[in-house]
Image (spheres, rainbow, N blue to C red):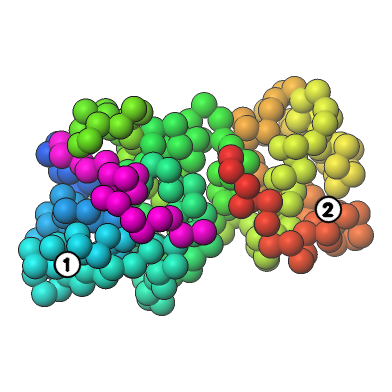
Amino acid sequence: MPYPTHGGRHELGQNFLVDRAVIALFEDLVARTSGPIVEIGPGDGAITVPLSRTGRPITAVELDPKRARRLARRVPAHVDVVAADVLRFRFPRERHTVVGNLPFHLTTSVLRRLLETEYWQSAVLLVQWEVARRRAGVGGATMLTAAWWPWYEFALHARVPARAFRPMPSVDGGLLSITRRDAPLVEGRRGPYQELVRQVFTGPGRGLREILTRTGRFAGPALREWFGDERLSPYALPKELTAGQWGALWRLSDVRGRGGGGNGAARAQGTDFEWARRPR
């Protein structure tokens, strides 16, 4: 659902970035990427203007038409300012980089949109601190992160204090980068793998081995061997698994699924991870 189009930018949830050190770090992270840039929510151009000096083509997607017109007058010709709702915007069908200081209340919606969108290769995003930590797997991965890890790498770069914004929000921000993997850690459609992740995160059991056993997807000896190879406690929690361990777990499950034992995977063939749309 698109967010409201009435009121000023702050009423739409935007907190402007004013800290020059944070802007410089943003520039440095973007400099490690390549290709055209799509910026989400440029506002008054705190990030747009510095990035425009690189000469890279930029499409700045701004919801507020008045701000979009004002920004368009400040930037060079290779910056195209588009007045549009990013949740409806059609991203380029070519390799590009996404950047943005996201309105905190829209972070989850925008991230879901991006993760489901093809062609972009890297994203550098300023989001709410706790969201950045969870997406990067700091302190344990969430179900949403685990669901997308085989296709993307998430990295947390810095905590951005609330005083770096105007108006000042009630929480800190975090600089998060997302990079599309050249080779996914799992093969095939995303839905069946993501159904496994959902089963594991929501399944009953005292520890990971009991949870996995109850899914009916794994042969006992193979599962015990996997725990030994990965040096995992039977009482480990799903959030403690790494991206590589999720990939290995899927392959262990997938062998059994091809033989007819993967009922959860079969059910997921038509769902295409609808569960991942729920807030996490």
Q: Residue at x 16, y 50 (%)?
A: 46
Q: Spatial distance from mark 1 to mark 2, Cα to Cα?
A: 50 Å
State the quadrant of the C terminus: top right
Residue 17 shown in magenta: yes
Judge the density around disc 1: few (<14), some (14-19), many (≥20) Cα neighbours within 10 Å.
some
Q: Residue at x 80, y 57 (%)?
A: 265
Give me the disc on residue 69. 1
Q: Main secondary structure of the magenta part?
A: loop
Three-letter amino acid code at the position of disc 1: Arg
Residue 34 shown in magenta: no
Three-letter amino acid code at the position of disc 2: Gly
The disc, 1 or 2, on the residue closer to the chain's N-terminal end is 1
Q: Residue at x 31, y 61 (%)?
A: 63
Question: Where is 207 relative to 146, above or below?
Answer: above
Say if residue 219 shows up in the picture. Answer: yes
Give me the disc on residue 12. none
Apparent side of residue 152 relative to residue 203 in the rendered image (left or right): left
**Which residue is label 2 attached to?**
264
Judge the density around disc 2: few (<14), some (14-19), many (≥20) Cα neighbours within 10 Å.
some
Cβ atoms at labels 1 and 2 below 8 Å apart: no
Q: Secondary structure at mark 1?
A: helix
Q: Secondary structure at mark 2?
A: helix
**x, y (%) of residue 226?**
75, 37
Apparent side of residue 146 relative to residue 205 in the rendered image (left or right): left
**x, y (%) of residue 119?**
43, 70
- Image: magenta residue range: 1-19
Q: Nearer the viewer, residue 232 or 110?
A: 110
